[in-house]
Amino acid sequence: MIQACIFDLDGVIVDTARFHFLAWQRLARELGVSFSEKENERLKGVSRMQSLEIILELGGISASDEQKEKWATQKNQWFVEYVDTLLPKDIFPGVHKLLEDLKIKKIKLALASSSKNAQRVIKLLGIASLFDAVVDGTMIKKSKPDPEVFLLAAQRIGVDPSYCVVFEDAEAGVEAALAAGMKCVGVGQVTALRKAHRVVVTTGDFRSEDLEGL
């Protein structure tokens, strides 16, 4: 019996991924590095500093830790500028209803994201009050596919991992959920998320009653 649902943020609840891409592309352009949506696929589900390392690798650029911090901070400033344009209407169709239906069924809800801006985003979307716990990038040391973010979320809501289901749109996230001993609903294309217990095209395609079949 599933007792808790743990949601990733980017690509699952809202499309902030496009803001990350725009901000990273802007930084890459300043560094003289070619960075397209194809290269951006490598950044999905990993931390800010790891993402920066990938971009520097693409450009064959070496830099001090201090310089890397400055670049990462600049990228985040641009990202936050984009994020601040978010409104409740930007939530993916059907997600708000799914969250409310799960609450009615007494299912615990947690947000687990590697983004350090996760709390800011859900406040802008007007859904912060629906979550029993939020774990973001400021609270973890290891990025997906390490299960740390999901295990901490389960701990925060007091539910054993085996009774949790994770909603994820990235392959690294699916692997993290499975490593945590949790069920996983992949959001996106089956080809990339085939290890998930179930795959839906969008989060809103999942219904609260579908938990029984996991």
Image (tube, helix red, strand yellow):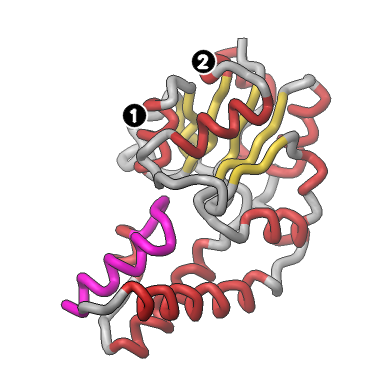
What type of secondary structure mainly makes up the magenta span? helix
CA distance separating discs 1 and 2: 17 Å
Please state which amino acid type lies under the numbered disc 2: Ser
Q: Do the residues labelled 1 and 2 touch (CB within 8 Å)?
A: no
The residue positioned 29% from the left and 77% from the top of the image is 64
Under mark 1, the amino acid is Lys
Task: Give the side of residue 49 with respect to residue 74, left or right.
Answer: left
The image's mark for residue 100 is none
Judged from this view, the residue extending furthest toward the top is 1
Q: Where is residue 73 in the image (x, y as percent from the top left)?
A: 50, 75
49 in magenta: yes
Q: Residue furthest left?
A: 60
Q: Is mark 2 on a helix, strand or loop?
A: helix
Q: Position of residue 16 (x, y in %)?
A: 57, 62
Residue 199 drawn above or below residue 61? above
Residue displayed at 79% across by 35% down: 100
User: First in sequence: mark 1 or mark 2?
Assistant: 2
Q: Quadrant of the N terminus?
A: top right
For the residues carrying marks 1 and 2, which lies nearer the camera in this image?
2
Say which of 160 and 183 sits in front: 160
Q: In this view, does 56 lie above or below 133?
A: below
Nearer-the-camera pick, 192 or 113: 113
Is residue 26 visible in the rendered structure shown here?
Answer: yes
Quarter-of-image position of residue 117: bottom right
| Residue, disc 2 | 162
Residue at the disc numbered 1: 195
Query: Which quadrant holds residue 78?
Result: bottom right
**What range is drawn magenta here?**
43-61
